[in-house]
Image (cartoon, rainbow, N blue to C red):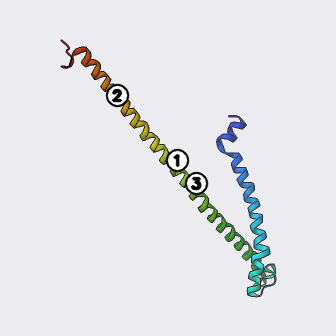
Amino acid sequence: MNFLEFIANYGVIGLSISTALGLAFHSVVQNITNEIILPFIGILFGIKKFKDLTWTYMGQIINVGLILKSILGYLINFGIIVLFGLVFFRDISKQVHNIKKQNELDILDEQKQTKSLLQELVELEKNRDDRIYGKKGKSYI
């Protein structure tokens, strides 16, 4: 298998495009989280900067702000992806359903045409036999 066949068979181009779009999307969501949502939450709870939000436990400083920022960014990414997925895949499933339904109708139409042709052939054969052997039917003697 050569390189072009590999790309065509395994959808590597689609995967690479999806990865690039995912990275760009992550950067947009990260900026929205850092510049809009976190400052708004900070205003509500009186926190000036989330990176300064720390918790000290047994002499160790735990940077809770960065953890909250990461969790919030993840939840926003997840929510948007789920919403996008629901809308996108619902549309795709409708299209697939319509295509399957149309294919079934086409198959039924072809079956009806085939049945009609077979009935015509049987009728022609019957008429031919009537002309050759008379109305009584075939005589094999």
Q: Earlier in the sequence, mark 2 or mark 3?
A: 3
Query: Residue at 30% of width from left, 21% of height from top?
Result: 125
**Which of the two residues, 94 or 112, is positioned nearer the viewer here?**
112
Q: Which residue is mark 2?
A: 120
Q: Quadrant of the N terminus?
A: top right
Looking at the image, residue 43 sits to the left or right of residue 117; the answer is: right
Task: Give above or below for 124 relative to 104.
Answer: above
Residue indicated by mark 1: 99
Indicate which label's residue lies in the foreground, 2 or 1.
2
| Cβ–Cβ under 8 Å for marks 2 and 1 | no
Residue beneath label 3, please? 92
* Kind of residue at disc 2: Glu
Q: Position of residue 131 (x, y in %)?
A: 26, 16
Label 2 vs label 3: CA separation?
Answer: 42 Å
Q: Position of residue 117 (x, y in %)?
A: 38, 29
Name the residue nearer the viewer: 61 or 7. Answer: 7
Q: Quadrant of residue 120?
A: top left
Q: Amino acid at mark 3?
A: Ile
Disc 1 marks a residue whose amino acid type is Ile
User: Which is more N-terminal, label 1 or label 2?
Assistant: 1
Image position of 30 (left or right of 124):
right
Lower position in the chain sequence, tag 3 or tag 1: 3
How many neighbours does mark 2 have within 10 angstroms: few (below 14), some (14-19), or many (20 or more)? few
Which residue lies most toward the bottom here? 46
In the rendered picture of this protein, how many numbered marks are placed on residues?
A: 3
Q: Nearer the viewer, residue 52 or 127?
A: 127
Residue at the (74%, 75%) spot, across then down: 69
Q: Choose top left, top right, bottom left or bottom right for residue 77.
A: bottom right
Query: Badge 3 local density, few (<14 within 10 Å), some, or many (20+)?
Result: few
Estimate the spatial distance between the alpha carbons at disc 3 and disc 1, rounded to whole Å.
11 Å
